[in-house]
Amino acid sequence: MTDYSNSAGPKRQELGSARSEVTQLETPLTEVIERRTFLKVIGSAGPAAAITACSPVPPEKIIPFVTPPQDVIPGIATWYATVCGECSAGCGTLVRTREGRAVKIEGNPEHPVNRGGLCIRGQSSLQGLYNPDRIPGPQRRRQTDAATGLSVVESTTWDEAQPVLIDRLRELSDGGNGNRIALITPPHTGALASLISSWTTALGAEWIRYEPFAYEAIREGSRRVFGRQELPHYNFAQAELVVSFGADFLETFQSPAEFARDHAGQRRVRNGSKGRFIQIEPRLSLTGASADAWYGVTPETEGLVAAAMIQVIISEQRAQGVADDLAVRIAELVADAAPEQVANQTGISTERIRELARAFSDPSLGAGRTLAVGGGVGVSGSKATATQMAVALLNYVAGNIGATVDFSEASSIKSSRYADMLELVEKMRSGEIDVAIIQDVNPMFNMPGAAEFETALARVPFVVSLSSQSDETTAQADLLLPTHSALEAWGDSNPRPGVYGLQQPVMQPVFDTHHMGDLLIEVAQALGGPITSELPRRGGFYRFLRDEWERAQPAGSLPSTTSAADAETVIDFEDYWADALRRGGVVFPVDPVEVKIQPQLFDTNLMVELASPIRQQDFTLITYPSLHFFDGRGANRPWLQEIPEPLLKTTWGTGLEMTSSTASNLNATEGQLVTVRSDHGQVDASVIINEDLVDGVVAIAIGQGHTNFGRYATGRGVNPSLLLDPSPEPLSGGIRWTGTKVTLTPRQLIRPIPRLQRTFDQEDRGLAQAVSLTALAAGEVHPEEPHFSLSPEHDHPIHRWGMSIDLDACNGCNACVAACYAENNVPVIGADQMRRGRTMSWLRLERFNEPNPGSSGPDVRFLPMLCQHCDHAPCETVCPVYATYHTEEGLNAQIYNRCVGTRYCSNNCPYKVRRFNWFLPEFEAPLQLQLNPDVTGRSDGVMEKCTFCVQRIQDGKETARDEGRSVRDGDVSPACAQSCPSQAIVFGDMNDPSSRVARLENDARAYHALSVFNTRPAVTYLKKVTQDG
Amino acid sequence: MLALAGIALVAIGNLTIFNAQEPEAPAATMSQEKSGPTTQPIAFSHSHHVSDIGIDCQFCHAYARRGPVAGIPSVQRCAGCHQNVLSDQPEILKVLEYWENEEPIPWIRVHDLPDYVRFSHKTHVRSGVACENCHGNVATMDAAIQVESLSMGWCLSCHKDRGATRDCLACHY
């Protein structure tokens, strides 16, 4: 296995050897030509010999179809609508395939969840599909030495492997011991969930739907307050003020692509005002970085802030739609939470809490126009449930229940609680489980280490893995039956009532894998029994899925048709199915749900539950889900490792975040290893300086520190779950991700994490600009100073492509960066190169800090930086070979085959967006199957950079030409603009005065980066809008 | 949608230059020399099919109007006629053997552009460029041979004559 960190890219010798292989095909060379001999040959035979030496091109084959598939034209993309399988959000996707391979994944604009955008993890699912560390086919463990217990894992066939499982299960079910079987899967929904449910019920087996971020406390809090053990749906689009208690809703929380879009829409400036957003948490998250103000708070006291807000709202009689007697009882619950009483414990001043409470219950907004969100992982300490109860009550007194907090669309995902998983672990440890079947979850890695899942699993005599990716858990398996990835499999998804996504395979399986549903059906049929009558006799899971959909088809219209006349028509199932496949699913209206405060709530002593723990000398550890890796599942994907984490700009690793003052107190510096000890374990982690933490807090991102998860992830970063308290939070049974006490001991070793941006200071260059809401409303515009130019003006007779990027909508989520990597075959170069400050990304997200008086933290600004396609481009004038020039359509072209690699252009570019290939890019098989055939791969010695996705421009122009019309606004969308969940990027023709991009160029917020250089970029930035005060 | 099962992976010329199996296109292809006849796996005669029988180019190269690549006829298309026509001839028996084994015929590529060139048959065919402008008078050839140099200068001379784009980015991206 390659050690990626030390591989400095492919070596030139390798290229040489590839060439000599080619030469051998033509004229077999048996002798090794030494350099001296070679020079003699050159000297004697002259130039002719030199030319023949490099001219032979091996004949290429041109392979026809045996039988041409319908609807496929070679060289033209085929798109499939399906569902993203990366997390439970159930975003709809459109997958572009070329010649039978998936090459790009994009959000489905018609899908009600994400409506076109797709997060970085979804974009990277292609690297899950083509991951070189997927399990290539069935494998079986064979003991080689009975005395020592040594064993090897050997490849086998499905015909041999499947009966092994069947025999084992038959033995147990025939003996009435079905309860000794456990199945651990992700929280599936839809047809697969109902199949698994019948399957486990028939066998009497236990089914755990394991999800590390299962939000147990929100469910339990909702149950105790409203009697509904559910995750409500948050309606960010309606919220004039969002107060988030540690919810990373723009990163991983529940449905980030959806929330990002809704939230950005609400925060757009309309009629001189815009939605406000306050984030309350101990560590500034990426979500918090978008907030108007971030209030740093002592860990596990978020609930006290919420309780104090309730206290203020009720005592000042600002509660909305709450009966008087109920208001009195709620007031009693939070009587001890007056702002004066909690300010000290929380670290937020009395005035600030009062202001926040008043803004949250502002009568001028009307009832139900604010929203409080309690974080899933962010507030999952020992107070998790009490905090969520306070947040739920806060929403209740502001009249938000049924408006911005909606139980009619509560999540349909039924995850097991962490406590349920612990019960299973206990059964495994005590020998009550004989067969454990595990699919696509990795509890070995992400359960708290002290829960000792590993030792418990070792007591299970027969462990079967159905995972597609080899990881820490599959390494323990006795039998590996790898299943399809989501892009290869039929399925459906039901993230919430009324939303049914249909998942179809977009290509043939890359490896020798089977569908999990097919496997379960075949096993059930082999075992026999009453369950077989529920299962299709042939057609496998595909038939089962169709049958389920046929049963669920509503009488009447296609769900997409809304007119009453159509509703009367009976629709044939085939049409219904085809329509659902084409659109990616169906949507039904849902009935509203009314919720009431539960009387039992008042038996709880909320203030006791919320009471702040006593501060100790130790540090408090915060662990948080990683934007890139989620619970760790994304760590073996090169894009996710390589793309810098947007807040800290770290790549290829995680470490222990601490402020510079904490570090200097410890005598530690950036990159130095520190031993982190808790009562439950210890790890060594590199110091990462992060100033945006409250005192006494250190933080580690969840997702890295893998010990056995493929070539890109293994041995990188640090796994915080090894430090966590294994006992669940008492009320909800969830993992306590936050609040573990740790001690820190610096070691005299350095292991720096590559960080791609060294300062967040703009040094007054005005790269990422902002304007206050008042100034904007007052019409204050500061036009850029016109500059005289010696360069001739360019003519753009037909099109002039341009882009506008709204810094007020950009939340730094990195989706555009991943989309660019996928679309443009941008190579991954590895940690060693990145440590030298190199990167190949055509589009990067820059982070800058400015002072923010109303906040505990800085005003964070994100600036997506890409080639500005300048009219007066400094790169063009210095290229000695005319490899870069200005096209008639306003693009700054880079012609790879002309480029000789002087790098003058890059040195002369003030935006530093040009990338030089120091090495021949390498794409480890089968990752190369993802490469976009519409974009030339670049070889070593060549400069490359953003092209505005010229291949998509060509495609848009060609489509328009085929349809006999001119290009319309919206026909062309580069990968970055298409992917943006908050729609911050707009692309179009600036020659068309009605285009969105042309209008935005004249917006009051428009400016150009580094306009002082008079480069006249085609990229217009729109200033971030800051709230006053 | 369900036609997926039938999709075979096809190697299209202009994939990428970092495919491990493919060498980097050497500079010599910039001024490609005209090729002699290539030994193809089957002694197919263009002149017989075009001149003697009168089959249109796009009957077999069916994608030329619709996509970037003209397409080599599927084995099904060959066998479709030849299961009944001359099905006892030795060269035809080879075709039928490929068909029965469900294997593609490994034709040798004759017209090969460097990997950094984006060429679309569709664009050219629809603008009225005739097949023979680039491929020569295939109607008189048995195995196809490369008649034109396919060099950039040769492309540009035609683009100049016809008033077509001469922007580098039209073909190189």
Image (cartoon, rainbow, N blue to C red):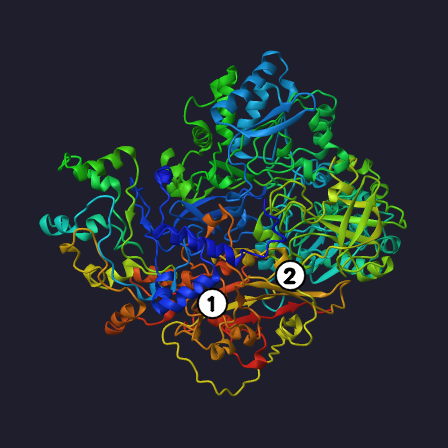
Q: Position of residue B92 (x, y in %)?
A: 18, 38
Q: Residue at the top extreme?
A: A175
Chain on which label 1 sits: A
Query: Residue A442's quadrant in the figure?
Result: top right
Identify residue type, mark 2. Gly
Q: Residue A781: horizontal and vertical position, in percent?
A: 60, 79
Residue at 54% in and 49% down: A124
Residue placed under numbered mark 1 in the picture: A996
Marked residue chain, label 2: A
**Left or right of A687 in this view: A762:** left
In terms of sequence position, does the residue under pointer 2 or pointer 1 come before the other?
Answer: 2
- For the residues beneath circles 2 and 1, the answer to whether they share a chain is yes
Q: Nearer the viewer, mark 2 or mark 1?
A: 1
Residue A102 in the image: above or below residue A344: above
- Across and down, in percent, residue A209 comes to 63, 32
Identify which amino acid the numbered label 1 is placed on. Arg
> The N terminus of chain A appears in which quarter of the rendering?
top right
**Residue A248 vs residue A665, the one in the foreground:** A665
Real-space CA distance between mark 2 and mark 1, rounded to the nearest whole angstrom:
23 Å
Q: Residue at x 48, y 56 (%)?
A: A15
Residue picked out by circle 2? A275
Instruction: Report x, y in % for residue A460.
Output: 68, 24
In the image, A356 versus A962, the foreground residue is A962
Crowd tier of the residue under label 1, counting other residues whose Cα lies within 10 Å: few below 14, some 14–19, many 20 or above: some
Report if the CB atoms under discs 2 and 1 are less than 8 Å apart. Answer: no
Seen in the picture, residue A872 relative to A359 is either above or below; the reply is below
Name the residue at 74% across, 22% down.
A430
Q: Residues within 10 Å of mark 2 (few under 14, many from 20)?
A: many
